Image (cartoon, rainbow, N blue to C red):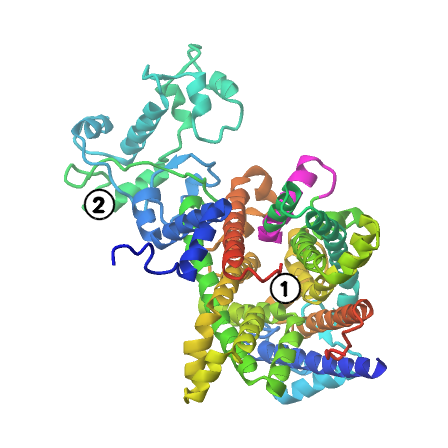
Amino acid sequence: MSGTVQSQPESPWARAWRGFKKNRLAMASLVFLLFVSLMAIMQPLVERHITRFTVVENHPCHRYMPPGARGIPRDNFLLAPIADEASARADLNRDGQWTALELSEALAHEELAALDDDGDGAINPAELDAAPRALTAPAAAVLKSLDKDGSGTLNFEEARALIDLFPIGEANAWTRRFDTDADGRLSAAEFPGLPRPATFWAGTDSLGRDLTIRLVYGARVSLMVGLLATLVSLVIGLIWGAVAGWNGGRIDALMMRTVDVLYGLPFMFLVILLMVVFGRDIRLLYIAIGAISWLTMARIVRGQVLALRNLEYVQAARAVGASTASILFKHLLPNALGPILVYATLTVPETMLTESFLSFLGLGVQAPYTSWGALANDGARAGVMVTYPWLLIFPGSILTLTLFALNVVGEALRDVLDPRSQNG
Amino acid sequence: MLRSLGARLLQNLAVLFVVLSLSFLVMKLAPGSPLSKDRDLPPEIEAMLAEQYGLNKPLAAQYFDYIGRLAHGDLGPSIKQEAPVADILLAALPYSLITGLQAMAFALLVGIPLGILAAMRPRTFWDHATMAISTLAISVPNFVLGPLLILVFALGLGWTRTGGWAGWSDSILPSISLGCFYMAYVSRLTRSGMLEVSRLDHVRTARAKGASETRVVLVHILRAGLLPVVSFLGPAFAAVLTGSVVVERVFNVPGIGTFFVDAAFNRDYFLVLGAILVYSVLLVMLNLAVDLVYSVIDPRITLDGKQA
């Protein structure tokens, strides 16, 4: 039988996937969504190895740092491996012990050495300009004011004023942490190595928390609430729609009329009320959102069941005595899966939007934990927006991009799975 | 027609009643009371205040008190603001109404032409560009769009103020950020509705009889093609009211939404219930108006929801 060209016809799912792949915007959106989900799932790993700042740790000395600035992670510090040379250099008075002051100086020196691209031991204007920190004046003016010897460059002594990477307060706290014999200084046995600076890739907020890891954590909350709320709406919508469509007649008319009436109700106000009065429990959050998002799903399912229930194969199943439940779940729903999947996908951005809306009002996840809506709320405060725009732009654009990607994927799915539909 | 209108009104009244009762129950089941958040009051004064506002009666008695007063047109007192709820809401209503109606006007006046543009040139650059823009507009939450508009037009260009309400010009940015989503949705509904209708026989007949393209589009396609838009208006009004809660906060508009959230936080029972009542009544009236318009445009639909 080797002459057969194709033993099996292409399955509808394979055909749909082939069609989906042709839509470049949808494929790009899918990749973006996979990336965001991956980061969200791996948040603990991202926190430990990439940002090294944790979601909750705040650095009073690093409030409102711009993207690219650097700091020393405190809660989740990873120390640089002990390098004798570096340790010796940090020990300024050569007593074999390290004080907080010495550590602070050593780290400032390392930081300046990192800025000093040409390695000449001085910071020139171009290097100062490239430094990822907020200067209160143009680099040239700053340089002129600090350049005491008039050399046109800043030696490390002069540039020390620019570095607040590891201020003495943090250095003290950090030293206390390792100072097991509480003598105010670290011995060689206590000193595990210099702390390693990390970059605030997306800047910091009003409490000096790293926005990058907060965005990743926000993705976790926003995506999870979006998915769970969609699941809740899917369950209610499936049951409501299937019961209405299967029974037909007066029951159907009554149930669908109820859906019509519910469509016009300001449910959101009840949800706001619920969230305000019963604490901000995340379970309540997605159940409440799901409970107000099932209406369209019920209509879709009902339409599908209504269209399918009189087909011959269903009649045949009924004739051989299959139970209603088995007909619904084994024969009807699998055939209606396409449109259901499409609308479930399109419900996700809707529920995520509702979640961020509630979080924006301060009704979502409790501080210090966060979601994208809560982050956008922090950034949208009147005084913050102008001076520290990254606090609005990063959460706002990542939320918008994710919703956009979800909508694009949902619409592309609709084009390939439910081509007759012309809605929206 | 009048009979079905009456039936609709009765049905809406029942729905209003259910919403109000549910809200009452949620508020009363919640921990805390409007008096508890103040500085510690001496017990006798607290008892006196509770007596004054009827908070010491059993739940059912409080409920019937409230409904009874409502029947006389009395929305009760705001416990926190020490003013009648009706006065507070009446003062706030115009701001919310202007913002909401302008948002819908923006949605329709921009969305429908965009949809027509896309539908007249399907599968061309114009179509794809319009639809991509509308997907983007659907994806931007209004609480992100609002601050961005402030950043650009108020702080950057200095054309408007950043918030508050001193005159009509302060309503422009709130209305746009509130209406943007619906503008995008309306443009898609217009496009798909028109594309569907343009394949129908009566359109082909009109073309065959030599009607001008403008006439075909505006008279024969648009009228039927806009039906999905009209039926979307009901849910859209509900969502616009909801969205106004956030937009009013972003732009510091002294509307009902601002009062609503604060009142819920403060357990200011009568103010919360009053706000929900106003929202629901608005919604019911707007929905009724939409249905009336619908039955005028599409004679096949009657008001009680049955197909004639």
Q: Chain of mark 2?
A: A
Prevalent SS, magenta region: helix
Measured Cα–Cα span from mark 2 to mark 1: 50 Å
| Residue A423, image x, y percentages | 62, 61
Res. B262 mark: 1
Q: Give whichever of A13, B95 is nearer the camera.
A: A13
Total labels: the figure holds 2
Q: Secondary structure at mark 2?
A: loop
Q: Give whichever of B289, A20 is nearer the camera.
A: A20
Is residue A281 visible to the viewer in this orientation of the structure?
no
Q: Dot 2 corresponds to which residue?
A: A182
Q: Is residue A308 magenta?
A: no
Amino acid at circle 2: Ala
Write the start and end of the magenta stretch as one range: B136-161
Tell me the mark number nearer the camera, choosing from 2 and 1: 1
Residue B40 vs A137, above or below: the answer is: below
Q: Is residue B153 magenta?
A: yes
| Residue A23, image x, y percentages | 49, 47
Name which residue lies at 80% across and 82% down: B4
Q: Quadrant of residue A97?
A: top left
